[in-house]
Amino acid sequence: MKTESLKLVCFSPTGTTKAVVQGIARGINHCNENCIDITRPGARKQSLKTSEDDLLVVAVPVYMGRVPALLGEWLQAIQTHNTPTVCVVVYGNRVYDDALLELKDMLKHCGCKPIAGAAYIGEHSFSRSETPTAEGRPDARDLKHAELFGRKIREKLQSFPSAGKIPEVTIPGCHPYRGDSKLWTVDFIAVGNECVQCGICAEGCPVGAIDPENSALIDTKKCITCCACIRNCPNHARMMKPGLVMDASLRLSTLYNERKEPEFFV
Ligand SMILES: Cc1cc2nc3c(=O)[nH]c(=O)nc-3n(C[C@H](O)[C@H](O)[C@H](O)COP(=O)(O)O)c2cc1C
């Protein structure tokens, strides 16, 4: 079948999920491509509508082995009927548990037709130079893999006359889903004197947890510990305080230093 447009949806606080989705898009090589980045709260105010003639790719990071709970509402509101859909999760070299299956189930529930799925590895959000986990990933090898996956998706589409005829992809995993959809509520960010109140951290926060007038004020109830503000700070003024997240960073770096490889299901 021929598709009229490629719609790429991603939530990507620290950019690794977006890099993977762009790699997949290069492989699909569609002339009419549209990226819908739902990382910022404003972008999630608008819902998505797709048709049978579109190809939809939805990519999210894995949080505690699950699809980030804050995306549930937006994902469930997608208006679609039989849109061929590719489900992608990106995880920090620990595990993705049943997050890919959960994403597939969510998208199927709103009328999508899941035709392929994949799990990629991105540098862990808690990774620091002192305690790195999956540093620099996705790297060139991962992105080549993503392009290959994109080409496989295109081939699969081309080998069927219509969306209705494409078989649904089988994703491994189990119900009830493993992992935990509840995130930590923790005060873990220290703001140094280098902070010039430029507001970049508040602007890039996916949940609006940082006060734009005073970036040292963080609403820990809203914070999802994504670490985007640490990564985005041009003055390196934001860092982890000793405690739960810093301990996790050390633990991850020690326990998950063996390279995991991406997987796809077509
Ligand atoms: C709250 C939280 C929970 C996470 N849980 C997991 C996990 O269960 N397994 C894993 O391998 N990585 C986990 N990660 C790491 C992210 O999945 C990974 O770094 C991903 O590449 C981040 O995507 P982004 O760069 O698009 O934000 C977690 C990250 C955060 C912030």
Image (spheres, rainbow, N blue to C red):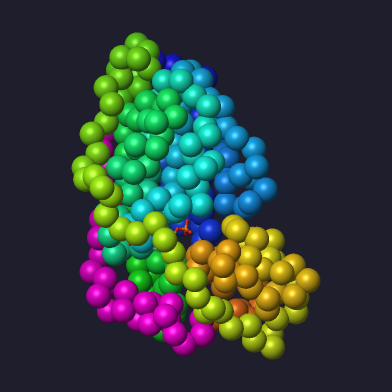
Left of 10 or right of it: where is 84? left
Residue 135: within the magenta? no
Q: Is residue 1 visible?
A: yes
Q: Position of residue 12 (x, y in %)?
A: 51, 54
Residue at image location 27% in from the left, 54% down from the top: 178
Residue at 36 percent across and 53 percent down: it is 66
Q: Quadrant of ligand 1?
A: bottom left
Q: Is residue 261 above or below residue 116?
A: below
Q: Viewer-proximal residue, 187 or 25?
A: 187
Q: Please state the extent of the stretch shown in magenta in the rendering.
A: 240-266
Q: Residue at x 52, y 79 (%)?
A: 188
In the picture, measured across the screen, residue 41 lies left or right of residue 181, that is right
Residue 57 picture quarter: top left
- Quarter of the view holding residue 35: top right
Most distant residue in the right direction: 213
Q: Is residue 31 left or right of residue 212?
A: left
Image quarter in which the N terminus is found: top left
Residue plotted at (62% across, 62% down):
205
Q: Position of residue 106 (x, y in %)?
A: 39, 37
